[in-house]
Image (cartoon, grey):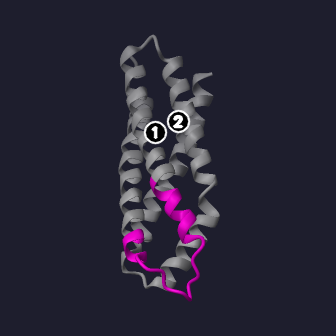
């Protein structure tokens, strides 16, 4: 059962963290005009706001499961539990930071400039950077757990 769980863990984790990285590298909204920001944000949210968090939750559960399966190797189990902590922090940044802002921006019209939109945009970017860094560290620990030699 370990090999299939690890395979899914690596595959789904790569999709999740790859999406975070792609948004970080190619979608820095800080220089966007209001209309561009709203249109881009709403489009991204439509495609990613449910799918990526669902894949992230499955990745977290698989990481806990693989930690359990490898409980006899204490170092491996602790490494995977630490990875889980980082993945959960990324999930919390999404759930408590990005998604509430997504819900607000989703109600905006690109034709009517909202007061404080630049502050909201900066807050969203902050939460996105937190989740990207935390998710990347968590996923790196998962990958390390797979490639490290058994003891």
Q: Is residue 103 left or right of residue 91?
A: right
Identify the mark at residue 60; answer none if there is no mark: 2
SS assignment at label 1: helix
Query: What residue lies at 43% left-to-right and 58% top-to-bottom?
Result: 21
SS assignment at label 2: helix
Q: Is residue 63 left or right of residue 25?
A: right
Q: Which residues are magenta?
A: 97-121
Question: Which residue is at the front of the view, 38 or 114?
Answer: 114
Query: What residue lies at 43% left-to-right and 76% top-to-bottom?
Result: 117
Query: What residue lies at 41% left-to-right and 42% top-to-bottom?
Result: 89
Tag count: 2
**Up-down: is 89 above or below 70?**
below
* Mark sitting earlier along the chain (1/2): 2
**Up-down: is 17 above or below 1?**
below
**Up-down: is 139 above or below 146?**
below
Give the residue pinned by disc 1: 88
In which quarter of the view is residue 120 placed?
bottom left
Query: What residue lies at 54% left-to-right and 67% top-to-bottom?
Result: 104
Q: Is residue 118 magenta?
A: yes
Callout 1 environment at 10 Å: few (<14), some (14 to 19), or many (20+)? some
Provide residue 142's location: percent of width, then percent of height. Answer: 43, 35
Quarter of the figure with the C terminus:
top left
Q: Are marks 1 and 2 in contact (CB under 8 Å)?
A: yes
């Amino acid at each position: 059962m370990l090999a299939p769980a690890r395979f899914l863990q690596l595959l789904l984790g790569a999709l999740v963290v790859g999406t975070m990285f792609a948004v970080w590298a190619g979608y820095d909204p800080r220089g966007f005009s209001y209309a561009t920001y709203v249109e881009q944000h709403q489009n991204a949210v439509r495609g990613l706001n449910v799918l990526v968090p669902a894949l992230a939750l499955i990745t977290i559960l698989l990481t806990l499961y693989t930690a359990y399966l490898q409980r006899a190797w204490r170092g491996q189990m602790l490494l995977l539990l630490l990875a889980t902590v980082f993945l959960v922090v990324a999930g919390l940044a999404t759930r408590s930071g990005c998604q509430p802002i997504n819900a607000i921006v989703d109600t905006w019209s690109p034709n009517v400039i909202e007061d404080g939109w630049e502050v909201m945009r900066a807050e969203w970017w902050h939460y996105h950077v937190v989740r990207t860094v935390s998710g990347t560290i968590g996923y790196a620990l998962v990958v390390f757990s797979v490639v490290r030699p058994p003891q």
